[in-house]
């Protein structure tokens, strides 16, 4: 095995070129290396192709990947996507080391490779541990748990030789029609920022560059369609869509950022100098490098029709500050930077300084990660980490914390006695995992989880009943038959998402937006028919966004939102259903009653007329942001608020007592909301400012404390500068955005 350490003696240290000398400052090393590089070598550092299809091809061989990687490296390319995705835990590190060894030993300057992939809810390399999809992680409302999860993801990712991940997603899910809502941490900037910071800080502790995406305001385009045009004001961008990215730069020190496919106010993000230059670099001080979303350099010509050629698009992007060209489609990518930048520079159409600046930023990340000193990984670690007992246990813990009990009339938890259990539905024997899932996650299906946990002596009956997507009632009769025999019916319904675009049974996810949020196919009809045969119906949903339930909600006695819950999904469902675990997940997005209400979120600004519809009076949502039931009851009391300090030293401390008034231990998610009662510029009717998930034993009480700072009370004035406008503020301690338990107004 190749030595994993590079040792420098006093003699050879003194003869090293500056860029090779780890004692020298990074900027000095970058400057030295840039002077030594040819234009071709510089441009090569700015492109990222894949040496293998993103979807595992038939007849896959590691040797083929290595051969293609060597070909790309020979062209001067310095980044490779998905290079170790399909290799096993045993072979992946060997492949990564072989790629790095070739770059180090067989190229003129020995510049290491950035091996890239995704880790949205787990390393995407073959056989990794999968955790709940992002929307499920957000439903935990637990950023401390997120840190534990990303420690596991970071260890598995780094052990495979991956040095950069295009994660996490910092877009807001404020229009649940978008198929990629599953990738988000919900609709609220506060929740998103807390979860995103936990992810980025933790991942980079493991020597993997985070790349939060997609800057900015993706997933909220016209019609709730991914990457469609966005028409937001600068105020809305700065107050709602920018905060998580700003925190990623200034608080987490993210090393990279991915730009969005979309165009804002008519300018594609990939050549928007205001976003990349003025906001990211000048205003926020971002030092890393900016990557496009896949094929964005091409899209300015081929999709947006902004440029009249790939050549012009290349010029627009590099001059606006887009550092790299990412092109991952099979079989051969179109690499605009590689094809056109050298020509543009030589013809005097692009100043080489733009190339140098971008290369310097890429090299900054490589030096920061220590790749010039040691690009290799210990080949013995990955096999020990992949789906190890510790990580599987964490996958179970995170799945349990993510699930949201939406409705329960006392049907759950099921009694711990033998019974006949009918398991019905197109998702009963399929653990739906969501997009960005590795091959062979070894996931536990709902059926297997229930069968393993059901009380001894129970009889398990099964019928699929219907398909997920295709209308077909031929299976209804068999399902109704077993429902009539059962004491309880567990119906596993929902959606399906996969990164493998166009695969069968894909109802949401990337390129799969929705104009109707009802359950697809005959799922709703099946629920209604089963409820006629047996009223003891529990619906368990596997999905990545909101589902409308108007037709069938009244026919179910309980509804459990399980999301795409990861490798341990079936076991987690069973523990909640049988009362081994008290559910405490909370919705990170609003569930509308009908699709026509979208976009619908908890924190709009005041309206000029009625808030509802002529055909839908009263509350708009089916289930509110922050909603989630428990098997116990929590009481709130003793609200106390104290103020101290002035100006930017302002502190407002909020405390209350939460008592578990039930008979079962459980978690409560205490949510702190704020409203600026009167303001010269209208403010949202409600704003989440803090939250805390606390575990309280039955009959016990917990003092919950929050601190609000100056920034929590400010908004942007007419010149878009932060201001704290004196006046009244309503502070609310809540169980959800629609369930305010305690409130008090203060004057500042």
Image: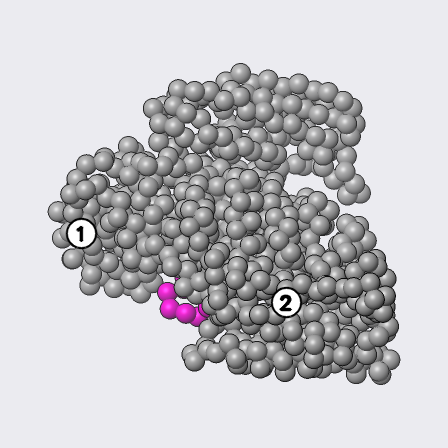
Marks 2 & 1, CB-CB < 8 Å contact:
no
Q: Which residue is mark 1?
A: 461
Q: Residue at x 52, y 48 (%)?
A: 149
Return the residue nearer the eye: 484 or 131.
131
Mark pair 2, 1: CA separation: 56 Å
Residue 3: image tag = 2
SS for callout 1: strand
**Other-residue count near label 1 (Cα within 10 Å), few / some / many at <14 / 14–19 / ≥20:** some
Asked if residue 651 shows in the view, the reply is yes
Q: Splitting the image into 4 quarters, where does residue 191 fall?
A: top right
Residue 338's x, y, as percent?
Answer: 71, 79
**In the rendered image, which quarter contains the C terminus?**
top right
Q: Earlier in the sequence, mark 2 or mark 1?
A: 2
Residue 675's x, y, as percent?
Answer: 62, 30
Looking at the image, is 481 positioned above or below residue 103? above
Q: Is residue 737 left or right of residue 302?
A: left
Q: Residue at x 32, y 55 (%)?
A: 445
Q: Residue at x 63, y 46 (%)?
A: 197
Q: Is residue 574 left or right of residue 249?
A: left
Residue 588's x, y, as percent?
Answer: 50, 43
Return the residue nearer the eye: 405 or 507.
405
What colour scheme governs how the chains and residues are painted in the rendered image of this protein?
A: one colour
Return the residue nearer the eye: 336 or 443.
443
Magenta residues: mostly which secondary structure?
loop
Instruction: Give, as a single range, the part of the protein colored magenta.
Output: 499-507
Q: Splitting the image into 4 quarters, where does residue 463 fall?
A: bottom left
SS for callout 2: loop
Residue 401's x, y, as percent?
Answer: 44, 41
Residue 601: image tag = none
Q: Residue at x 39, y 37 (%)?
A: 583
């Amino acid at each position: 095995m190749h030595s994993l350490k590079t040792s420098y003696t006093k003699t050879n240290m003194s003869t090293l070129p500056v860029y090779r000398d780890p004692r020298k400052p990074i900027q000095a090393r970058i400057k030295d290396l840039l002077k030594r590089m040819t234009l071709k070598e510089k441009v090569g550092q700015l492109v990222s192709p894949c040496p293998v299809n993103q979807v595992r091809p038939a007849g896959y061989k590691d040797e083929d990947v290595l051969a293609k990687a060597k070909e790309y490296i020979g062209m001067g390319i310095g980044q490779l996507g998905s290079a170790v995705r399909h290799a096993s835990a045993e072979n992946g590190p060997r492949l990564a080391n072989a790629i790095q060894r070739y770059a180090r030993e067989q190229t003129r300057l020995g510049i290491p490779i950035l091996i890239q992939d995704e880790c949205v809810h787990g390393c995407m390399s073959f056989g990794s541990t999968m955790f709940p999809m992002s929307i499920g992680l957000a439903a935990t409302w637990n950023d401390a748990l997120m840190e534990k999860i990303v420690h596991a993801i970071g260890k598995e990712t780094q052990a495979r030789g991956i040095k950069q991940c295009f994660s996490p997603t910092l877009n807001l899910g404020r229009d649940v029609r978008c198929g990629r809502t599953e990738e988000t941490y919900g609709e609220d900037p506060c929740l998103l920022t807390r979860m995103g910071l936990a992810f980025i800080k933790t991942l980079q502790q493991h020597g993997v560059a985070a790349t939060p995406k997609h800057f900015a305001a993706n997933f909220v385009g016209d019609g709730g369609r991914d990457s469609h045009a966005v028409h937001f004001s600068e105020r809305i961008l700065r107050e709602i869509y920018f905060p998580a990215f700003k925190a990623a730069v200034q608080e987490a020190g993210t090393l990279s950022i991915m730009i969005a496919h979309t165009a804002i106010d008519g300018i594609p993000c990939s050549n928007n100098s205001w976003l990349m230059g003025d906001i990211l670099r000048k205003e926020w001080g971002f030092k890393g490098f900016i990557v496009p979303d896949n094929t964005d350099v091409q899209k300015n010509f081929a999709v947006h029709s902004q440029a009249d050629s790939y050549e012009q698009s290349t010029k627009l992007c590099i001059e606006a500050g887009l550092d790299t060209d990412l092109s991952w489609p099979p079989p051969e990518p179109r690499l605009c930077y590689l094809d056109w930048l050298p020509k543009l520079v030589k013809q005097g159409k692009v100043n080489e300084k733009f190339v140098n600046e971008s290369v310097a930023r890429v090299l900054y990340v490589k030096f920061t990660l220590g790749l010039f000193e040691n690009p290799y990984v210990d080949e013995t670690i990955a096999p020990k980490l992949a789906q190890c007992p510790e990580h599987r246990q964490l996958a179970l813990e995170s799945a349990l914390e993510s699930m949201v009990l939406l409705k329960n009339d006392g049907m759950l938890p099921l009694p711990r006695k033998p019974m006949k259990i009918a398991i019905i539905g197109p998702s009963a024997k399929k653990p739906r995992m969501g997009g960005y899932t590795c091959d062979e996650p070894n996931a536990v299906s709902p059926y297997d989880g229930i069968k393993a946990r059901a009380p001894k002596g129970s009889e398990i009956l099964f019928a699929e009943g219907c398909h997920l997507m295709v209308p077909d009632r031929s299976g209804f009769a068999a399902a109704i038959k077993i429902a009539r025999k059962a004491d309880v019916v567990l119906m596993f319904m929902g959606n399906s998402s996969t990164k493998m675009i166009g695969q069968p049974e894909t109802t949401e996810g990337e390129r799969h937006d929705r104009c109707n949020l009802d359950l697809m196919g005959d799922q709703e009809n099946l629920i209604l028919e089963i409820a006629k045969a047996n009223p003891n119906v529990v619906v368990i949903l596997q999905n990545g966004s909101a589902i409308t339930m108007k037709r069938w909600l009244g026919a179910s006695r309980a509804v459990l939102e399980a999301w795409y819950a990861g490798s341990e999904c079936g076991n987690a469902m069973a523990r909640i259903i049988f009362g081994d675990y008290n559910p405490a997940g909370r919705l990170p997005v609003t569930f509308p009653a009908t699709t026509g209400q979208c976009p619908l979120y908890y924190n709009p600004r005041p309206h000029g007329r009625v808030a509802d519809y002529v055909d839908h009076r009263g509350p708009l949502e089916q289930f509110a942001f922050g909603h989630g039931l428990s098997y116990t009851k929590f009481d709130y009391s003793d609200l106390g608020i104290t103020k101290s300090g002035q100006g930017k030293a302002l502190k407002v401390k909020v405390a209350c007592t939460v008592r578990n008034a039930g008979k079962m231990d459980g978690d409560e998610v205490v949510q702190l909301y704020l409203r600026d009662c009167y303001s010269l510029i209208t403010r949202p009717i409600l704003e989440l400012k803090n939250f805390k998930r606390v575990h309280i034993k039955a009959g016990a009480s917990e003092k919950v404390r929050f601190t609000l700072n100056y920034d929590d009370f400010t908004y942007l004035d007419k010149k878009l500068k932060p201001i704290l406008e004196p006046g009244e503020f309503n502070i609310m301690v809540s169980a959800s955005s629609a369930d305010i338990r305690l409130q008090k107004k203060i004057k500042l």
